């Protein structure tokens, strides 16, 4: 379980720090400080079905895609990505981007982020994507509900119902915590 002040960093210098955690906010939100190095993807196109994501850009610029439109927010600007809207964000610039990210409400986002960060650190995330089996576990079991790019929500629901038990037998878990 992550705590306020927990910092995770990968070999490329990307990092995230838990500024406020759900246990301190009664589940209302989780706030992270994130640094993405140039040409890095945070997470593949996805949608959080029950939570909004709010980004406050502190340094640099963040590129994001929402409703298949590519846009940029710069230092001093705020971006709100509403729940149930497929999006992705990344650093397309030649300088790091530093931002706060607030996810509201939290649901089970903290162990999800912790798991993703560990996979990121261990080179198991490719262009912001976990492998298919891991994604099926998340689609089936996350309280906050997440969907990924490429297949419709209904198809992902159906596939995760069938394949998540197999993924579990193969050793995949909902979350991997230190």
Image (cartoon, grey):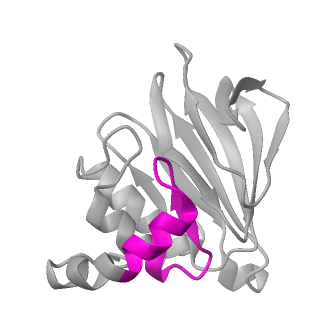
Hey, which quadrant is residue 66 in on the image?
A: top right
The structure residue drawn at horizontal position 55% and vertical position 56%, both measured from the top left corner, is 17
* Residue 133: in magenta span: no
* Quadrant for the C terminus in the image: bottom left
Q: Nearer the viewer, residue 59 or 123?
A: 123
* Residue 144: in magenta span: yes
**Residue 78 x %, y %:** 84, 39
**Residue 24 x %, y %:** 72, 81
The structure residue drawn at horizontal position 75% and vertical position 60%, both measured from the top left corner, is 83
The structure residue drawn at horizontal position 50% and vertical position 48%, both measured from the top left corner, is 149
Q: From this view, report whether residue 53 is shown above or below residue 176.
A: above
Q: Nearer the viewer, residue 141 or 105?
A: 141
The structure residue drawn at horizontal position 65% and vertical position 49%, both measured from the top left corner, is 86
> Which residue in the rendered view is the most extreme toward the left?
170
Stretch of the chain drawn in magenta: 139-161
**Residue 161 x %, y %:** 40, 82
In the picture provided, is 64 more to the left or to the right than 45?
Answer: right
Q: From this view, report whether residue 36 is shown above or below residue 121.
A: above
Q: From this view, report whether residue 46 is shown above or below residue 143.
A: above
In the picture provided, is 169 more to the left or to the right than 24?
Answer: left
In the picture provided, is 63 more to the left or to the right than 35?
Answer: right
> Which residue in the rendered view is the most extreme toward the right?
77
> Which residue in the rendered view is the most extreme toward the top?
94
Q: Nearer the viewer, residue 1 or 115?
A: 115
In the picture provided, is 170 more to the left or to the right than 44?
Answer: left
């Amino acid at each position: 379980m992550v705590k306020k002040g927990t910092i995770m960093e990968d070999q490329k210098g990307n990092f995230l720090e838990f500024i406020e955690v759900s246990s301190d906010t009664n589940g209302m939100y989780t706030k992270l400080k994130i640094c993405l190095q140039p040409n890095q993807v945070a997470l593949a196109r996805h949608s959080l079905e029950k939570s909004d994501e709010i980004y406050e850009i502190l340094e640099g610029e963040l590129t994001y895609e929402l409703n298949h439109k590519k846009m940029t927010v710069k230092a001093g600007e705020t971006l709100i990505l509403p729940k149930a809207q497929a999006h992705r964000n990344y650093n397309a610039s030649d300088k790091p981007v530093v931002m706060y990210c607030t996810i509201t409400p939290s649901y089970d986002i903290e162990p999800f982020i912790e798991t993703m960060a560990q996979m990121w650190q261990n080179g198991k995330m490719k262009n912001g994507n976990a492998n298919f089996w891991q994604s099926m576990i998340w689609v089936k079991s996350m309280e906050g509900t997440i969907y990924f790019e490429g297949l419709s929500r209904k198809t992902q629901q159906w596939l995760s119902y069938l394949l998540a038990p197999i993924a579990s037998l193969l050793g995949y878990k909902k979350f991997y915590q230190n």
